[in-house]
Amino acid sequence: MSEYDVNKNIKLGICPIGWRNDDIPSIGAENTFPQLLSDAALAGFKGVEMGGFFPCPDEINYERKLRHIEIAGQWFSSFIIRDGIEKAAADFEEHCKKLQTLGAHIATVSEQTYSIQQTSKNIFEDKPYFTDEEWEKVCAGLNKYGEIAKKYDVKVAYHHHLGTGIQTLAETKRLMDNTDPDKVGLVFDTGHAYVSEGDAMPMLNEFVDRVVHVHFKDVRKNKEDDSRKKGLSFQDSFMNDMFTVPGDGDIDFKPIFKTLADHHYTGWIMVEAEQDPKKHNPFEMALKAHQYMEDELFAPYQK
Ligand SMILES: O=C1C[C@@H](O)[C@H](O)[C@@H](O)C1=O
Ligand SMILES: [Co+2]
C-alpha cells in the first residue's frame, strides 16, 4: 500500500466554469456567486478558483468564509509578447496583490498573445506559433513573473492551452526547459493535454516534477471527434459537449492520479469542466465528480 496520504496532500476544488463561463458571459448568468459557493461546499469541495463574475474581495472573503471555502487561485491572461515584459509584469503584480487579499496562492498564467481561444477559428488546426525571439521574451517574462509572485506567496502555474502558442508537449517542454523551475511551475490540465496530444499521460510523465497545480477536465471522445470533423472553434467545441467532469468522459484518470501520488504531488486538484449549465446541471455535475474522485481515485490512498 502506498505511503501517500491523499487527505494530507490533496485539496479538492472545483472551478466556476461549469456554472458560468467568463468567455461566454451569456451562459449561466442565472447562477450567482453565493449559489456557486454553496453548491461547491455542499458537494464537498474545499475551494474554487476565481471567476470573472465574482464581487469585490471583501465580499468574496465574507461569503467564502461562511462556507469554509478557499480561493485556490485565478487565471491570468498574459500579454508578454504584445505588451512587453515591463507592462506585463506590472499587470501581473496587480494580479498577485489581489490573490494575496483572497488568501490564494496560485496564478494560472497563459500567454494569450495570438490566442484563438476566444475567436471563431478552428481550434484543432489554427493554433498560433511563436518565433524564436518571441519564445525568448515569453520565457524571460515568465521568470520575471516568478520573482514577483514570490513577494506575495504566490506560485506561477503556467497553463498549456489549446489554441495558444504553448499548447503541445513539445511547446510545453520548450517552456519548461527555458524557465527556472524555482520561478515557473506548470498547471497540468488533463483535458487540454488529451485533446492536444491524444493522451494526457505523456505530458504528465514528462513534467510531473514541475506540476504545481492540476485541472481535472474530462473529454467526451465522440464529441471531440465531431467537433474536430466540423472544424469548430474552442467555444463551439465546449458548447458541443466536448468537455465534462472527471468520470463522465473518456480519460482514464486512474493512472493520472497514481502518477501524481507516486511523485507525492501536494496541492490542489481542481475539477474544471466547461459546459452549458442549461444542459448539464452544475451542482449535479459537481456531486458526480466528487463522488467519482473519492470512490475511484482517492480511496486506495485514504489513511
Ligand atoms: O483553466 C482554464 C481557464 C479557462 O478560462 C480556459 O478557457 C479553460 O479551458 C481552462 O482550462
Ligand atoms: Co484549465
Image: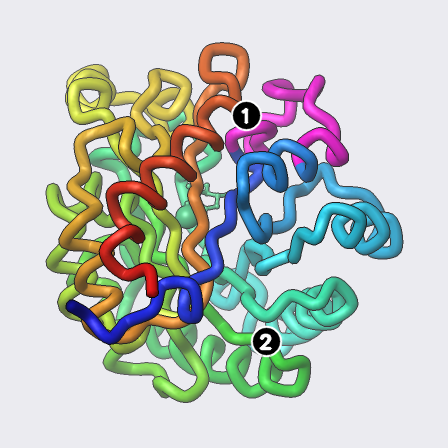
Q: Is residue 181 above or below residue 265?
A: below
Residue type at mark 1? Phe
Rendered-image quadrant of the N terminus? bottom left
**Residue 106 placed where, x, y %?**
55, 67
| Residue shown at 41% from the left, 78% from the top | 184
Is 137 displayed left or right of 78 in the figure?
Answer: left
Q: Which residue is mark 1?
A: 283
Callout 2: SS: loop
Is 159 displayed left or right of 254 in the figure?
Answer: right
Q: Is residue 103 magenta?
A: no
Q: Which residues are magenta?
A: 18-36
Rendered-image quadrant of the C terminus? bottom left
**Is residue 163 visible to us here?**
no
Residue 198: name its quadrant.
Answer: top left
Quadrant of ligand 1: it is top left
Of label 2 and label 1, which has the lower sequence position?
2
